[in-house]
Amino acid sequence: MIFILSQEEENHVTFLRPQKSANILGLTRPRAYVILTKLEQKGILERRKKLGFFLTKMGNQVIDVLNHRKQILEIFLHHDLDFDLESASEESLKLLLAISDKIIDRLCKKMGKPKECPHNLIIPHELEPSLNVNHQLNR
């Protein structure tokens, strides 16, 4: 949820409100609120009265790791598996949480640690090593 919302906001998430989150994701407001609250309980978001939910330091690290994964997967799908750019982008979103850090690391090394994704965005390679995104989001 936070990754999709961050993409919607062009990687500049200031705060999330349940109604806006629901509108973007096609959810009901109560369902969006439940999800935001769960992310708060995991330490990814922090709630501030009358403002909404904000990304914590951990939340920003999760976004960075997910961006890295998405960019590496896009390159692999686009260059190695000949997906068109739009399809590579869509498929990479589907794989984000289904793939391990170990596989991403191997893909990244195999491709020579690419500097840019197919969208010409810089790929961050210096990420928080102790952050296990799959564990953080699925616990």
Image (spheres, helix red, strand yellow):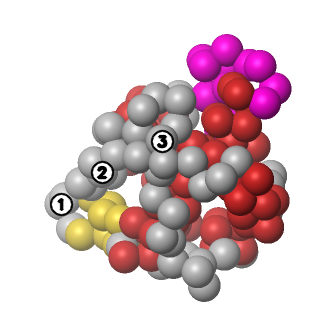
Residue 133's spot in the image, x, y percent? Answer: 64, 68
Please provide percent x and percent y for residue 100: 79, 62
| Residue on which disc 3 sits | 116
Residue 34 location in percent, x, y? 53, 57
Is residue 87 magenta-colored?
yes
Q: Is residue 136 shown left or right of residue 68? A: right
Where is 109 relative to 26, above or below?
A: below
Q: Crowding near pointer 2: few (<14 within 10 Å), some, many (20+)?
A: some
| Residue 62 in view | yes
Looking at the image, is 133 positioned above or below residue 75?
below
Residue 105 in the image: x percent, y percent?
72, 63
Distance between the alpha carbons at the discs numbered 2 and 3: 22 Å
Give the farthest residue toward the bottom: 130
Q: Which residue is mark 1?
A: 50
Q: Residue at x 60, y 17 (%)?
A: 86
Magenta segment: 80-94
Q: Secondary structure at mark 2?
A: loop
- How far is disc 1 from disc 3 in space, using C-alphas? 39 Å
Q: CA separation, marks 1 and 2?
A: 17 Å
> Which residue has dot 2 on it?
13
**15 and 8: which is toward the camera:** 8
Q: Amino acid at mark 1?
A: Lys
Task: Provide the secondary structure element on which disc 3 rests.
Answer: loop
Q: Is residue 101 left or right of residue 10?
A: right
Secondary structure type for disc 1:
loop
